[in-house]
Amino acid sequence: MDASKDTMAVRGLCVQPAFSVSSLVSSVQPSISSCATILRTQLSSQRHQLLCCCGSVSESCSAFTNHERARAGRRSNIVGQFSRTGLNLESFGSNRTSRRTVFSMSSAGPSDAQTLSMEEQEFIRTEEKINSHQRAAARLEREVEARTVVDRLANGILSTISKKSGGYPVPSMVPYAVEESGTILLCVSGLSPHTVDLEANPKCALLVAKDLNDRSDLVVTLISEASDVPEHDIEQAKSTFLKKHPGAFWVDFGDFKMVRLDPKQVRCVSGIVIGTASVSLFSGELFKCAAIDPISQFSGPIAHHMNEDHADQTKTIVEKSVGVKVDSALITDVDSLGFYVLSQREGNPLRLRIPFPRKAESRKDVKQLIVELLGGGASPEK
């Protein structure tokens, strides 16, 4: 690449139907940052934007993301050039000789109406409505959500530095329990490779996810240091572990011992592939001090009842709250600030956050808040 020409190559990928454009920048010359039109490329926290530009150009770039998503029904590649005077992007499939221009603009910037059909413009408006609602939807603080999820679940993937494999990390599925202090308890066998690994190197990580097949849901990784539970704490540790795993008869076996993981850092990832990607990294102390959301313990029964007996009402709530039509909506999780639903819209899955009008104080209060949601909100799209 010739930096003196103030251009840079960009490659991207359109993936349908779950996500539209992922920016893959091959190289950026330092001189580009001073370009009059283009500031830089970046990934939006709400959805992937291929470009991030100055002024009104940014809106055009955002429109391009949805424009290509509206048109593409297959995988396609995006290639183009930035310069001081403009931008041109072309799309091509596996046959590189067949290209078409999908977006073009000069410094003046053509209007979206010149590029998009009315149907595509309506698609973009609907997407923006959904994204705007989701950005504003109240959620638990990240450390509270992480602590709540880890406390509710019972199994995770423990990664240790393998002594046998020459220092490579090796994962194992393990049952765990959480102490009131926020530390994690394991009951491990001396015959297990991960026990040998922890004795040689106590640094490890425990990954916890509600559904390993759903990358849009929250995944929590506890970057931790392991140590044997002291003799004076063993009986209490066993009792805590047995409350979570009543059938764990092996806790008293001679070759098993109680191990405590002390979280040093916590990483939370959610919203992958659905356009609301979020990554958080915070201290283990923040995790350990976080309170467990009091409503989340009722999430399963509430969701089951609503999905079995009141699915139509849930659909109505989604349409009133978000302001768009959906084919169906099932509640997946409930907490004190709202709930998550898995909706179907035009044949595609759509995971949404629906906030309560106020914080729920009890399980009974959740019922009242659901009634309030049914009685008001934005009008669904026509």
Image (cartoon, helix red, strand yellow):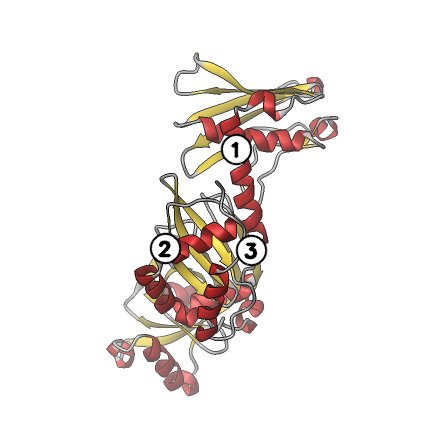
The numbered disc on residue 291 is none
Residue under label 3: 137
**In the rendered image of this protein, does residue 158 appear above or below residue 95?**
below
Single out the mark in the foreground, 1 or 2: 2
Q: How many marks?
A: 3
Residue nearer the viewer, 202 or 125? 125
Indicate the secondary structure of the residue bearing disc 2.
helix
Q: Identify which amino acid the numbered label 2 is placed on.
A: Asp
Q: CA distance from mark 3 to mark 1?
A: 23 Å
Residue 3 rendering spot, x and y as whole percentages: 68, 21
Q: Quadrant of the N terminus?
A: top right
Query: Which percent across, then down, holds residue 222?
Result: 47, 62
Q: Is residue 139 above or below residue 116?
A: below
- The 10 Å Cα crowd at callout 3, few under 14, some 14 to 19, many 20 or more, is some
Residue beneath label 1, please? Answer: 122
Of the two numbered discs 2 and 3 on the same chain, state the one appearing first in sequence.
Answer: 3
Inspect this view and state whether residue 119 appears: yes
**Which of the pair 278/274 is nearer the observer?**
274
Q: Which mark is residue 312?
A: 2
* Amino acid type, mark 1: Glu
